[in-house]
Image (cartoon, rainbow, N blue to C red):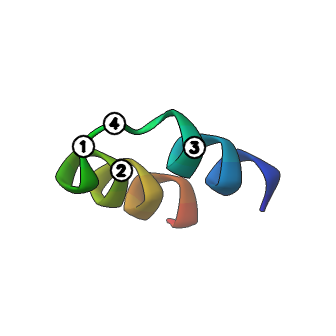
């Protein structure tokens, strides 16, 4: 959860954020 939030905040591009979020979730 914390990592997911950090990625969302540090992700400048929505596409990049979504891709990273999926990796963290899985």
Q: Which mark is residue 9?
A: 3
Position of 1 relative to 3 (above/below): below
Residue 21 point in image, percent of width and height:
45, 58
Residue 12 point in image, percent of width and height:
33, 36
Residue 20 point in image, percent of width and height:
38, 48
Q: Which residue is mark 2?
A: 17
Position of 19 relative to 11 (above/below): below
Report, in whole angstroms, how far the alpha carbon at label 3 lies from the one at label 4. 8 Å
Q: Are marks 1 and 4 in contact (CB under 8 Å)?
A: yes
Residue 22 point in image, percent of width and height:
40, 63
Element class at badge 4: loop
Q: Which residue is mark 1?
A: 13
Report, in whole angstroms, how far the alpha carbon at label 2 lies from the one at label 3. 9 Å
- Residue 7 occupies quadrant: top right
Neighbor class of circle 2 (other Cα within 10 Å; few <14, some 14-19, many 20+) is some
Report, in whole angstroms, how far the alpha carbon at label 1 lies from the one at label 4. 4 Å
Query: 23 or 11: which is nearer to us?
Result: 11
Q: Are marks 3 and 4 in contact (CB under 8 Å)?
A: no
Report, in whole angstroms, how far the alpha carbon at label 3 lies from the one at label 1. 10 Å
- Between circles 2 and 4, the one closer to the viewer is 4
Q: Are marks 1 and 2 in contact (CB under 8 Å)?
A: yes
Neighbor class of circle 3 (other Cα within 10 Å; few <14, some 14-19, many 20+) is few
Q: Which residue is mark 4?
A: 12
Element class at badge 2: helix
Neighbor class of circle 4 (other Cα within 10 Å; few <14, some 14-19, many 20+) is few
Give whichever of discs 2 and 3 has the lower sequence position: 3
Report, in whole angstroms, how far the alpha carbon at label 2 lies from the one at label 4. 7 Å
């Amino acid at each position: 959860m914390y990592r997911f939030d950090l990625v969302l905040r540090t992700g400048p591009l929505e596409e990049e954020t979504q891709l990273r979020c999926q990796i963290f979730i899985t």
